[in-house]
Image (tube, coloured by chain):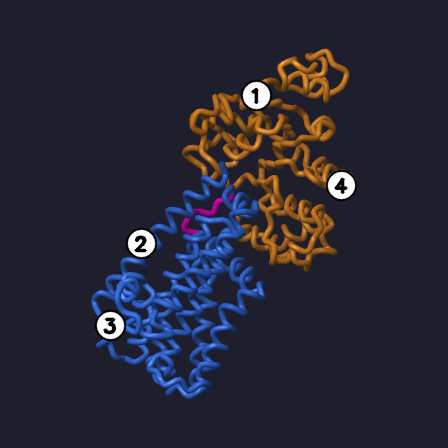
Chain colours: A blue, B orange
Amino acid sequence: MRMLNFAKRNFKELIRDPLSLIFEIALPLFLLFIFQQFNIPAENYRLENFTPSIILFGFSFITLFSATLISKDRTSSFLIRLGTSPMKAKDFILGYILSLLPIVLIQNVLFFLTAIILGLKFSLSIIPTIMVSMIISIFFISLGILIGSLVSEKATGGLGSIVVQLVCFTSGMYFPKDVIGGVFAIICKLLPFEACLNIIQSVLHNDFSNLTTVHIVVFSLYFVSVIILSIIIFQKRMISDNK
Amino acid sequence: MIAIKTDKLTKKYKDKYAVNEIDLNIKQGELFALLGVNGAGKTTTIKMLSGLILPTSGDILIEGMDMKKDMFKIKEILNVSPQETAIAPNLTVKENLEFMAGVYQIDNKNEKIEELVKNFKLDEVLNKKAKTLSGGWQRKVSIAISLINDPKILFLDEPTLGLDVIARKELWKIITSLKGKKTIILTTHYMEEAESLSDRIGIMSNGKLVDVGTAKELIKKTKTTSFEDAFISIATGGELS
């Protein structure tokens, strides 16, 4: 299978980049650990709420590093070589997505293990939470493919950082949106990150009372449109880069 | 038998012709050099012949197959060594070869890799990451990779660009060893490279294929004394001869 072969190559490229591992795994783990040492008296920082936040935070770096990998491949002649091979568009897109899923799984397992060591009560809902978060990660990977297809390697760092900041400030990870309210709260609702966090938290808590239709609709719209856009733009750039 | 045939092959970007109605007939096993100044249309021609970009108009037949209908079948039997080194930087040389063997779904993968390692003398760098190799080694690996699927047709786009004289001579030796076994289309800026390696030379200028022949034929035709002078005369339409 060409897509698995390509995914294997991408996985090796990613895990051999120490920066990628530091930001995707070590930094979120550090934040999970350090915030628990402060005993902050807020709902957001309780382990059952903050562990899903850390998962989402880790995903934002998945976007950053997938964007970097793709833009690097585009700017080198590597994609020219592959473009003349019998690989098809689906092999490329799925190859990129599949290569990142093992990293997402490693992230999730390590985050939950650390959270359990720090005091999170083990529950069977962790398993469906990991499964759902892996589906959500496809949105973040596709966002990376989209960014990596659109901009240069240098610009991916900037755009990726914006995604990291948006996750931090609009998901409700550090503070509830109602603390600021007004336009900020509307923006949080319209962006997909609050919905992502709410979905992961709801599955982990096995309590869906906070999950609104708006969250599901917003996430679904972003999920489908980013995947479709990433495929279209990637294919277009494969052609236009080679003019 | 004809390996590559084009009929009025054209690539147009907005109002500009990158390649303008070129007709090529390249025989099986022939080493055909495409020469031209920057922007003459050499790389665009190679990109169309290798299925990387679609022509605006015209036809391409590769080993009797139509590029429009059988692009993926054609891609199985050709390979390209692009102008810049095209290897995965964080993979070792061996992993690069294994990866490309996977791309072409090679059955006898290990045998093929062993053969390439032997022919290109890659033993000493086999387990080194590609990004740590010198430019000459990277280019050598890049060309070795382009032979992984035992292609019938091989495109070498400026294979010795930027290499020192020793690395260039080494690559010439490798390219010479492939002559007659593969149909090779080579683009280069080095006149001596085209003259000593190729069976025939096509000269492009402003997207047109202005002349084709052996180096000797082109020298004779332009009444010049060296191939470089013949090239200048043809490429400039006699203005600088």
Q: Amino acid at mark 1?
A: Leu
Residue A135 screen position, x and y as percent: 35, 66
Q: Nearer the viewer, mark 4 or mark 3?
A: 3
- Give how far apart the Cα atoms at labels 4 and 1 are: 30 Å
Identify which residue is drawn at 37% across, 68% down.
Answer: A169
Give the mark nearer the N terminus: 4 vs 1. Answer: 4
Please give the residue where the numbered disc 3 appears in the rendered image: A211
Front label number (4 vs 1): 4
**Could you tell me which secondary element the residue under label 1 belongs to?**
strand
Q: Amino acid at mark 3?
A: Leu
Near mark 2 (Cα within 10 A), the count class, few <14, some 14-19 or many ≥20, is some
Which of the numbered marks, if any, corresponds to residue B209? 1
Q: Quadrant of the N terminus of chain B?
A: top right
Alpha carbons under labels 3 and 1: distance apart: 66 Å
* Among the 4 quarters of the image, the one containing residue B83: top right
Q: Are marks 3 and 2 on the same chain?
A: yes
In this rendering, the answer to whether B178 lies above or below B97 is above
| Residue B155 drawn at (x, y percent) | 59, 36
Q: Secondary structure at mark 3?
A: loop
Asked if residue A87 is among those painted magenta in the image, a careful observer would answer: yes
Tell me the quadrant of the picture where the C terminus of chain B can be found: top right
Q: Which label's residue is closer to the chain start, 3 or 2?
A: 3
Q: Amino acid at mark 2?
A: Ser
Q: Which residues are magenta?
A: A85-91
